[in-house]
Amino acid sequence: MSPSNFPSSDAGDASDAGTAQGLLRPALTLFVTLSLITGLVYPLAVTAVAQFVFPDSANGSLILRDGQAVGSRLIGQSATDPKHFWGRPSATSPITYNAAGSAGSNLGPTNPALIDAVRARIAALRAADPGNQAPVPVDLVTASASGLDPHISRAAAEFQLGRVARARALPEAQVRALLDEHTQGPWLGWLGESRVDVLALNLALDAPSRR
């Protein structure tokens, strides 16, 4: 076969280059377009809708007092003062109720570390209220999976009611009335159980009219 019958390598290279260039342009265009949509337009649109429709939730469900944020309705806070209701323990690190590091303890029910932690929490509750011999509700001595729970069960609040009333020199009926105000029923009326917003309840107790 004569050499002239073979395809020219230069022509093949030029054809490949043209094909590559033809593919590169739409690929880059698609990349830039999707980057703008998913990285800029969509986040801005979602943020704008959230700020317009759900401004409170979009900004962290903050609780304000005198114009200052004192907490969030979504995140618990540590409390050890006998005058306050105590929330559910938190296993987040390096500090408790660390919203940037939501996590549980990942300790199994037979793990000695979990058993020791539960015993220590029971001891602290008993020491804060020596006369209270009622069974300790489980959510007062075990951390949740998130470590951020802002609520406790109604039983856990009732367990602490007498201690808080005595520490504040208030009638138990008055403290129970506040507890009733800050107790939320089961979701949709039947899912779950009643729960108490601990931070909101403690802030109500700390209001100037009740100090």
Image: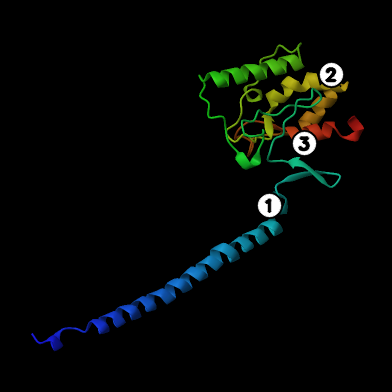
Q: Are marks 2 and 3 in contact (CB under 8 Å)?
A: no
Q: Residue 17's x, y, as percent?
A: 34, 79
CA–CA distance between discs 1 and 2?
A: 39 Å
Q: Nearer the viewer, residue 189 or 100?
A: 100
Residue 164 position (above or below residue 61): above
Residue 195 relative to residue 206: left or right: left
CA–CA distance between discs 1 and 3?
A: 19 Å
Residue denoted by label 1: 58
The numbered disc on residue 148 is: none
Residue denoted by label 3: 200
**Can you tell which quarter of the image residue 209 is in?**
top right
Residue denoted by label 2: 166
Q: Are marks 1 and 3 in contact (CB under 8 Å)?
A: no
Residue 58 position (above or below residue 85): below
Q: Nearer the viewer, residue 177 or 42?
A: 42
* Rendered residue at 21%/84% (across/down): 8
Residue 26 position (above or below residue 195): below
CA–CA distance between discs 2 and 3?
A: 20 Å
* Rendered residue at 67%/61% (across/down): 48
Residue 184 relative to residue 92: left or right: right
Question: Residue most toward the right?
Answer: 209
* Mark 3, secondary structure of its residue: helix
Mark 1 and mark 2 lie on one chain; the one further toward the N terminus is: 1
Mark 2 and mark 3 lie on one chain; the one further toward the N terminus is: 2
Q: Nearer the viewer, residue 19 or 142?
A: 19
Residue 65 position (above or below residue 42): above
* Rendered residue at 61%/25% (across/down): 142
What amino acid does circle 2 point to? Arg
